[in-house]
């Protein structure tokens, strides 16, 4: 028994139409599906919603719920905004730089490029306040991932005991 893949991930949005239009325009995603109900199927609670689905590539689906009867959308005040994010892979550094220019031309503030050694990233926010990351693999990604794979359990064990960053992969951000 094994999970095959993520079917979809779902987040809340402030406005379903605005969210779909933003992802289509800025990230070139296709709008796949909309479902709207006045009752939650799993709980039978009366709670009207619009549920929209976008194609994030390779059968990955990004979904959003607009919930007009619920209190205004917020975020966990105890978690820094850089922690919770959605990361999408792009083909290469050239594509990443094209997206950066495209986003900036659309008036979106973009942070980065940030070099994570294994990949390079840019960061920005969607109209709902969700942090988005676009990541392009490094040229030697496979070699670096293999190196990280060898130390993952040792790192996790050390972290669980000390709650301090193990030095096994310090080379990632030493440039």
Image (tube, rainbow, N blue to C red):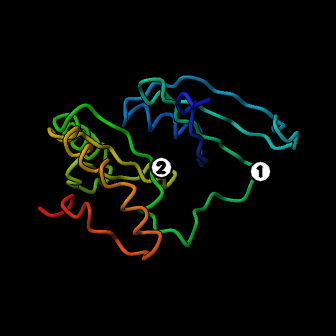
Residue at 38% in and 39% down: 88
Residue 109 is situated, as x and y percent measured from the top left of the image, at: 31, 55
* Residue 123 x %, y %: 32, 52
What is the distance, in whole Å, between disc 1 and disc 2 at their CAs? 19 Å
Instruction: Tell me: residue 150, above or below residue 97.
Output: below
Q: Secondary structure at mark 1?
A: loop
Residue drawn at point x = 36 percent, y = 62 percent: 155
Q: Could you tell me if residue 84 is visible in this image?
A: yes
User: How crowded is the residue under tag 2: few (<14 C-alpha within 10 Å), some, or many (20+)?
Assistant: some
Q: Choose top left, top right, bottom left or bottom right for residue 11.
A: top right
Q: 87 above or below 98?
A: below
Cβ–Cβ below 8 Å for labels 1 and 2? no
Residue indicated by mark 2: 127
Which residue ends up furthest to the left in the rendered image? 175
Number of the label disc, if any, that sits on residue 101: none
Give the residue pinned by disc 1: 69
When the figure is inspected, residue 77 is found, relative to residue 122, above or below; the finding is: below
Quarter of the figure with the C terminus = bottom left
């Amino acid at each position: 028994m094994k999970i095959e893949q993520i079917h979809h991930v779902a987040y809340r949005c402030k406005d379903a139409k605005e969210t779909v239009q933003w992802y289509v325009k800025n990230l070139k995603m296709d709008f796949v599906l909309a479902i709207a109900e006045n009752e939650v199927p799993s709980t039978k609670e009366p709670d009207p919603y619009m549920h929209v689905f976008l194609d994030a590539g390779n059968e990955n689906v990004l979904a959003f719920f607009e919930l007009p009867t619920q209190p205004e959308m917020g975020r966990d005040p105890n978690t820094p905004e850089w922690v919770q994010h959605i990361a999408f892979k792009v083909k290469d550094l050239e594509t990443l730089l094209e997206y950066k220019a495209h986003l900036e031309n659309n008036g979106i503030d973009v942070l980065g490029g940030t070099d994570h050694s294994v990949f390079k990233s840019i960061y920005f926010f969607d109209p709902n306040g969700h942090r988005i990351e676009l990541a392009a693999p490094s040229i030697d990604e496979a070699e670096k991932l293999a190196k990280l794979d060898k130390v993952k359990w040792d790192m996790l064990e050390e972290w669980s005991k000390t709650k301090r960053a193990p030095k096994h992969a310090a080379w990632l951000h030493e440039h």
